[in-house]
Image: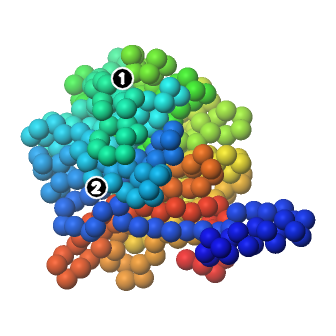
Amino acid sequence: MSMRDLIFAFVLCLLAGGTCTAAPHHSSEFIFPLEHWHNHGSCIVECPNGDLMVCWFHGSGERKEDDVVILGARKVKATGQWTKPFLMADTQGFPDTNCCMTIDPQGRLWLLWPTIQANTWESALMKYKTSTSYMQPKGPPKWDTMKVLHMKPGEDFKDKVRKATEAYLSTIEIPPEMAATVKLYVEHNYRQADDKLTRRLGWFTRAHPYILDGKTMLVGLYSDGFSFSLVALTDDWGETWRFSDPIVGGGNIQPSFARKADGTLVTYMRDNGAPPQRVLVSESKDGGMSWSTVYDHPELPNPGSGLEVANLDDGDWVCIYNDSEEGRHRLAVSLSSDQGATWPITRHLEFDESEKGSFHYPSIIQAADGTLHATYSCFVPTAEGKRKSIKYATFNKDWISQAQGER
């Protein structure tokens, strides 16, 4: 629908005395052209001036390649155009990966990411930068601070891991052929939890941090070594940190957060465990310090891929995810009007019937004007091999709600 048609429809609505709603809309574009470089793990924020900022990691691979850096780009509101990618973080000679961002109540931009010390996920060291000068039309933010997020789970971490593991195992039925594997996994985690260095390294980010009541920032973290999650919390914007109890399940990683009307925090997590794979869920009633036993969401499949859940301004929730237990060739957005209990409305941002493309690791926000903005990794097979970019999409709730009969 053209702008002229939108204005005409709005005027007709007013003349008829009706209640006008936004027309459904959706558009998408590559932030930069497809290329052979590995571009993955994006995160998007809206700046106070209405610009959009996106970060992702870029290089010849992931943790095993020492040329991996964090890049960014800005969609300038005044022009509607994306800038050329610029450097956000580079630890020379080490891979920098899995970045995320947020803007705090003081208007500061935060970039959080792990630097991989020894080319294994288990050697990840969390870092973060903050900036008060990031809305210039060209170039990267000017960073005010950079710090290491030193992970220090309590001395009782092993006991908490054991307690949470036993609680989770009591809720599931383990097939006899998997019993030995599960036993080895559990014993491995207990040994790791008892080792001071192991429990302090290897944690890293994926999804947006969550700002609770404008006072506390929750950073969702996970470990590929443990294959479970926890939360880092700061009440003084990075001066000090405290750490939640471990969120232990069957391979629950990459936590994303939403909040119920009664204040309960909910985390949705990627299923990195054995099939059947579903989005994994846990809840906290004490501001993110302790978490309920992890369970499978009955309506949300997951193929072992990142996702995000978020609160919308009108009380609904949105989830962006690969809605399949196998493959990343479908990328969906779903709406829930009952705080995540059910997800009856789903529409696809991408649906590749050939199953050869990969559209994954999405990030989503609702802008100040109510519009939804998402970015995600786009891996496309070509005659020259797989080519990769970060794709951007903007749409509204009405476009999702028109899902009947649509992909």
Quarter-of-image position of residue 242: top left
Q: Residue at x 18, y 76 (%)?
A: 385
Q: Can residue 75 be seen in this view?
A: yes
Q: Which residue is drawn at 37% across and 45% down?
A: 137
Judging depth in this view, the residue of 365 and 329 nearest the camera is 365
Residue 172 appears left or right of 54: right
The secondary element bearing badge 1 is classed as loop
- Find residue 281 and report its horizontal and vertical position in percent: 54, 46
Count the numbered circles shown: 2
Q: Mark 1 points at which residue?
A: 153
Which residue reaches farthest left? Answer: 93
Q: Which of marks 1 and 2 is nearer the N terminus?
A: 2
Q: From what the image shows, is residue 401 above or below residue 287? A: below
- Find residue 72 and report its horizontal and vertical position in percent: 31, 48
- Find residue 214 and report its horizontal and vertical position in percent: 58, 27
Q: From what the image shows, is residue 9 above or below residue 371? A: below
Residue type beneath disc 1: Pro
> For mark 2, does the 10 Å Cα neighbourhood hold few (<14), some (14 to 19), or many (20 or more) residues?
some
Q: From what the image shows, is residue 151 above or below residue 397? A: above
Q: Can residue 307 be seen in this view?
A: no
Nearer the observer: mark 1 or 2; the answer is 2
- Find residue 192 and report its horizontal and vertical position in percent: 26, 32
Quarter-of-image position of residue 101: top left
Residue 345 appears left or right of 72: right
Q: Mark 2 points at which residue?
A: 84
Quarter that holds the N terminus: bottom right
